[in-house]
Image (cartoon, grey):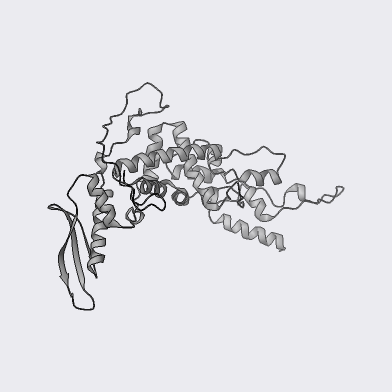
Amino acid sequence: MGHVHQRLASTTARLASSLSTAHLSKFPPKDLLFVKGREIPTATIDPDTWASLQPPPPTALSAFAHRIGLSSVLTSTEVIQQVCTHPSFLQLFKQHTPHERDPATNGQLAAIGNSLMGLFATEYVRATYPYLPTRVMKAAVTAHVGPLPCANVAQEMGATPLIRWQRSRGTLLKSGVLHSDALASIPRALTALVYQQRSLPSARQFVHSYFLSREVDLRGMIKFLDPKKALLEMVKKFQRELPKSRLLKETGRYSNSPVFVVGIFSGEDQLGEGFGSSLKMAEYRAAEDALLRVYLTRIPPHLVQLPSQTFPVGVGDVYKKAQEGDYKPPDLVESEIMYASSGNSFTHST
């Protein structure tokens, strides 16, 4: 077996683990074979490149649509193949098959889907955590529907062997394309297709099912330069009594491993509690705990009201005449405390 055939066999083996190769054309292509009476072909093609140019089998595309529960929306294998074709694939396709028609890509669909996913995630995070700071809210939206979650969801959907893309290096004006970037475009394109073929509530349900139903740890996203100063600003904002620290428990004060438990109170109400090997550390953690209790106040799921619930349910665009959904706007809360949020400034309250 020659070197070229060995490379082809290795490439085919990687694809055969998840895809059928019965639909693929024979390698090498006929135009690269020598035929008596014709000139010797000078063009060459790499087996890996040839394998990446081949479309996925229709059976795999159909199985993908049924696996993610969108068989009624993705009724054509051409549409599914468009969803799984990244715009970076066009350069590779034009380079080796310049005379064939360019395949449809998911570029525009991914852009629309990205906007829709950002809309759904923003309203969900804001309605669920009304006291969350703006910067943390943006980080939470990224953690729900950002590039990395989209790529992970695409892998869980089984879209990895179906994606057609080409790696490219970044420039000063354009960022490069990685495998995770190509994978992330698939859920975004699916969201746009659900919106296009069904309705906005259907697209929102799709995003909630695959993305917003996942738990995201927000505590690690909230950091404080000085929790005691930030807590003081917050208490003033809510017009409450100034916070005071009280020693609740202690043990081993004169030993090598003392433990102090400090609580922070506003009047008779305990705002937070923390422990540490020193009073300063325990007070620091107590102030941090008090801030987190406020910022991470969560509305129960059955009480969450989303503005997009007003759009009519059913197939059609958002401008159709139909009965609107029920929506009760939540009560406005106090604006956030922006502490040490503007560059070199020490404090800044609004």
Between 213 and 30, the one lying in front of the other is: 213
Q: Quadrant of the C terminus?
A: top left
* Horizontal arrangement in the rendering, residue 135 relative to residue 277 (left or right): right
28 relative position to 177: left or right: right
Instruction: Give the residue drawn at x 59%, y 47%.
Output: 174
Residue at 24 percent across and 69 percent down: it is: 278
Q: Residue furthest top?
A: 321
Task: Give the residue drawn at x 65%, y 55%.
Answer: 48
- 31, 134: nearer the viewer: 134
Q: Is residue 235 visible?
A: yes
Residue 100: name its quadrant: top right
Q: Is residue 73 visible?
A: no
Residue 145, percent from left and from top: 42, 46
Q: Vertical placement of 13 versus 326: above or below?
A: below
Q: Position of residue 37 (x, y in %)?
A: 87, 48
Say whether residue 243 is left or right of residue 7.
Answer: left
Picture coordinates of residue 80, whole percent (x, y) = 53, 40
Q: Residue at x 63, y 43 (%)?
A: 90
Residue 227 drawn above or below residue 74: below
Q: Looking at the image, which residue sits at the far right?
A: 37
Q: Nearer the viewer, residue 209 or 161?
A: 209
